[in-house]
């Protein structure tokens, strides 16, 4: 299966800008949420990604996420 990188549609850009403004997460967190979305939905779905980010923000678990992302990046090296 080939993956192509496409420019986000205007509606997708609105979500991305909202995430950056409202959540203020590090970029790796958005990428991680998008990766989870792709694994679960098999295609881009900003509503699903939004629900993930919202849940993480509500639970204030950003420190745990960053710890997990650091572990993942260390394993990949």
Image: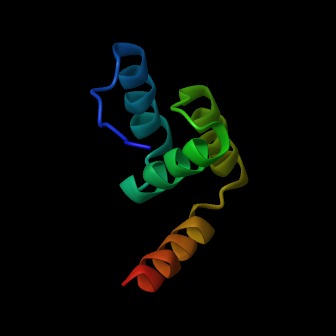
**Above/below status of 10 relative to 64:** above
> How far from the left and from the top, in percent, is residue 15?
45, 26
The answer to whether 25 appears left or right of 52 in the picture is left
Q: Quick one: 39 or 24, which is closer to the camera? A: 39
The answer to whether 32 appears left or right of 8 in the picture is right
> How far from the left and from the top, in percent, is residue 40?
67, 44
Q: Residue at horizontal 57%, vertical 73%?
A: 68
**Above/below status of 21 relative to 24:** above
Q: Residue at horizontal 42%, vertical 15%?
A: 11
The answer to whether 69 appears left or right of 60 in the picture is left
**Above/below status of 35 relative to 66:** above
Q: Residue at horizontal 29%, vertical 30%?
A: 6
Q: Quick one: 63 or 76, which is closer to the camera? A: 76
> How far from the left and from the top, in percent, is residue 10?
34, 15
> How far from the left and from the top, in percent, is residue 55?
70, 44
* Displayed quadrant of residue 42: top right
Query: Is the C terminus in the top left, top right, bottom left or bottom right quadrant?
Result: bottom left
Query: Is the N terminus in the top left, top right, bottom left or bottom right quadrant?
Result: top left
Q: Residue at horizontal 55%, vertical 43%?
A: 38
Q: Quick one: 36 or 30, which is closer to the camera? A: 36
């Amino acid at each position: 299966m080939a993956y192509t990188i496409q420019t986000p549609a205007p509606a997708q850009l609105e979500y991305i800008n909202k995430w950056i403004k409202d959540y203020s997460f590090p970029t790796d967190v958005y990428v991680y949420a998008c990766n989870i979305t792709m694994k679960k939905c098999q295609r881009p779905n900003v509503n699903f990604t939004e629900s993930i980010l919202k849940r993480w923000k509500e639970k204030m678990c950003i420190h745990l996420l960053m710890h997990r992302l650091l572990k993942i990046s260390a394993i990949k090296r």
